[in-house]
Image (cartoon, grey):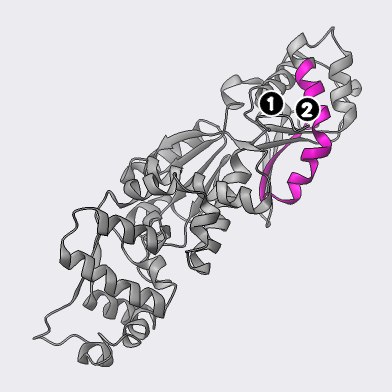
């Protein structure tokens, strides 16, 4: 992540053990390619000149960071999150969060005197595979923003599905900086959230951890149709599952947003779509009526299931769909994958990719000549 030092005259500060330790830790995190450090030239010059306070490594890291300031300073206008260190805040762990389009976590310098708190920020998801997918979206955002020279650094935390809320609470209670991304489990844009996201509530931040609930039903909803097609025709899926997904592709084409709210793992029944629209408003039924397979059905036209109705099932593709998709996606550049993907899905990628990059961006792995 980006750690920006708020302008300060270090000569005016009492250089106690905690302040020196914080500065050492911040610079070390830059040297270890964990965090990007932004500061005025005077900040780095003070450290470079004070061999009596700072060791060889800290002064070397300060010099390296100083040389990269021109290249990296514009990043705060690109990302939507960064940490600002304010040396004038003298209360340990004092912090404040601005909740505008660009979230800035302002924190006291002595927070970083604890080495465990200067480590790479944590990313919490319901499943480790979700993290891998969001990292790919970050890679795509980096490609589009022409930031390929930068890297990312993060600590993966497996939420364990239903236990994600407990993991999030523990992470935030530990005082570390972290981002938690979870599925909405919504089957309708205006529908109810699932049990996991409900447990996490609606608060954007808890301590120094942020919660983000994706728009889509689940991470699998963000997998391109052509990737899923490749998987189901390559693997041993039964014919009725393949036929069912072919039908869903027609519905996705009729209404692009339907893909975001389809339960790709479990599937659902036609009556579920009708019930959802009855509760939350038109969404599924108009998409169904626009396809020849469903436009003549009484239950679709009357938006009500009859007692003798033999309900149509839209079959799910199982719990391994994301894992199988990642094998393919990791072999390709996301920019190439995007050319075969709907614009609405790509916009979701960019939004999540920017978020991921903002929280976990790291210094260049190689210095550009």
Query: Looking at the rendering, in which quadrant would you find the C terminus?
Result: top right
Q: Is residue 260 left or right of residue 68?
A: left
Q: Check whether the beta carbons of the residues at disc 1 and disc 2 lie within 8 A of each other.
A: yes
236 relative to 286, above or below:
above
Check if residue 189 falls in the magenta segment.
Answer: no
Element under label 1? helix
**Number of the label disc, if any, that sits on residue 65:** 2
- Residue 217 visible, this angle: no
Q: Which residue position holds label 1?
A: 30
Quadrant in the rendering for residue 239: bottom left
Residue at (38% x, 51% y) in the render: 199
Identify the residue shown where x is 89% and y is 22%.
45
Badge 1: how crowded within 10 Å, few (<14), some, or many (20+)? Answer: many
In the rendered image, residue 75 lying in the magenta stretch gets the answer yes
Whole-angstrom CA distance, mark 1 to mark 2, is 8 Å
Residue 70 pos. (x, y %): 84, 38
Q: Quadrant of residue 317?
A: bottom left
Q: Quadrant of the N terminus?
A: top right
Q: Nearer the viewer, residue 26 or 100?
A: 26
Magenta extent: 60-88
Farthest residue, direction top: 52
Q: Position of residue 290 (x, y in %)?
A: 35, 87
The spot of residue 212 in percent (x, y) is 51, 52
Q: Residue at x 74, y 46 (%)?
A: 76
Q: Quadrant of residue 28?
A: top right
Say which element carries label 2.
Answer: helix
């Amino acid at each position: 992540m980006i750690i920006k030092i708020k302008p300060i005259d270090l000569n005016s500060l009492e250089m106690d053990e905690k302040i020196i330790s914080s500065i050492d830790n911040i610079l070390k995190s830059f040297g270890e390619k964990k965090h990007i450090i932004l500061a005025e030239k005077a900040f780095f010059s003070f450290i470079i000149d004070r061999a009596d306070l700072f060791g060889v490594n800290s002064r070397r890291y300060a010099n390296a960071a100083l040389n990269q300031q021109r290249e990296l300073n514009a990043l705060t206008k690109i990302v939507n999150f960064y940490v600002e260190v304010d040396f004038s805040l003298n209360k340990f762990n004092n912090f404040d969060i601005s909740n505008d389009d660009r979230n800035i976590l302002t924190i006291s310098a002595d927070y970083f005197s604890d080495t465990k708190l200067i480590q790479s920020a944590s990313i919490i998801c319901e499943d480790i595979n979700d993290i891998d997918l969001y990292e790919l979206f970050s890679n795509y955002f980096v490609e589009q923003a022409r930031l390929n020279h930068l890297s990312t650094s993060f600590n993966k935390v497996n939420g364990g599905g239903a236990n994600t809320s407990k993991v999030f609470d523990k992470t935030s209670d530990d005082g570390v900086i972290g981002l938690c991304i979870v599925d909405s489990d919504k089957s309708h844009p205006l529908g109810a959230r699932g049990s996991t996201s409900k447990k996490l509530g609606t608060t954007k931040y808890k301590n120094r951890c942020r919660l983000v609930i994706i728009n889509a039903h689940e991470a699998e909803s963000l997998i391109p149709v052509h990737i899923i097609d490749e998987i189901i025709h390559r693997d041993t899926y039964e014919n009725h599952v393949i036929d069912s997904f072919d039908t869903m592709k027609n519905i996705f084409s009729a209404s692009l947003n339907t893909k975001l709210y389809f339960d790709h793992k479990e599937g659902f029944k036609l009556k579920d779509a009708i019930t959802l629209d009855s509760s939350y408003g038109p969404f599924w039924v108009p998409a169904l009526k626009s396809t020849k397979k469903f436009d003549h059905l009484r239950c679709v036209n009357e938006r009500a299931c009859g007692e003798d109705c033999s309900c149509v099932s839209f079959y799910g593709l199982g719990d391994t769909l994301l894992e199988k998709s990642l094998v393919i996606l990791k072999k390709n550049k996301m920019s190439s994958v995007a050319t075969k993907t709907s614009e609405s899905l790509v916009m979701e990628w960019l939004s999540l990719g920017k978020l991921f990059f903002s929280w976990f961006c790291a210094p260049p792995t190689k210095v550009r000549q």
